[in-house]
Image (spheres, rainbow, N blue to C red):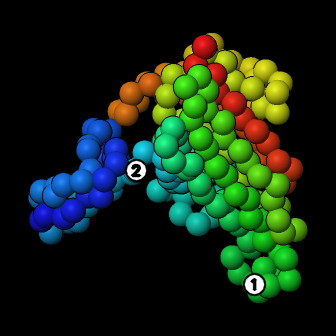
Amino acid sequence: HTFYLPHGTWFDYSTGKQVRGGTDIVISTDSTTWQDIPIYVRDGSIFATQPASEGNELSLRTPLLMDVFPSTSRVATFVAYDDDGHTYAYEKGGYFRQEVSAKRSATSTEVALHAATGSYKPHFLSYLLRVHQASAAVTTNGATLRKFPSETAFRSSSEPGWVSSADKFGAVTEVRVAAEAREQNVKLSAR
């Protein structure tokens, strides 16, 4: 299969490989299982996921995971939305809607969780921001956020904080913050 990938920097989500756009891409897929359908994420994007085993019935312990690919040339945006999923209460304000944006500069990346609208309390109690860059310090609304000593310590906790590591895309800083209706500004400093 051949398709055109528009100009820009892209990431193959399954392998982490960086791909330059502006050209045709040739891929092969298994048309029997369709388990290898490619997903390309553009630099300057926010890509939300949830554990496949959870489906739509997520527990309160499951954070909303957002892969953030910050760019100096584009503002990455995403809208987190939740409602009860069963009634029409959303028509009367029974929903949670929060805009998220991210922008990288030469020395830092700022992720803004804008003030939420709606009266619904979301099923997720926290956001897990997986920002694809190295960081030396992280603050939330100007206050220093706790750095966990290891990935194991970070994963075994549900408290706000951050940890640096690497994944298939390269350096990554994972930041956990509470899912709140108020505005939050998360700043990841490179130095």
Q: Nearer the viewer, mark 1 or mark 2?
A: 2
> Is 12 in front, or is 86?
12
**Could you say which quadrant of the image residue 169 lies in?**
top left
Q: Mark 1 belongs to which amino acid? A: Thr
Relative image position of residue 136 (x, y in whole percent): 61, 15
Relative image position of residue 97 (x, y in whole percent): 74, 64
Q: Answer left or right for 166 relative to 152.
A: left
Relative image position of residue 51 (x, y in whole percent): 51, 52
| Residue at mark 2 | 42
User: Which residue: 71% across, 81% down?
Assistant: 86
Mark 1 or 2, nearer chain start: 2
Residue 87: numbered disc: 1
> Is 54 in front, or is 68?
68
Mark 1 surroundings within 10 Å by alpha-carbon count, few (fewer than 14), some (14 through 19), many (20 or more) = few
Q: Answer left or right for 36 relative to 79.
A: left
User: Which residue: 40% across, 50% down?
Assistant: 42
SS at mark 2 in the image: strand
Q: Answer left or right for 10 relative to 76.
A: left
User: Which residue: 82% across, 65% down?
Assistant: 117
SS at mark 1 in the image: loop
Relative image position of residue 171 (x, y in whole percent): 44, 25
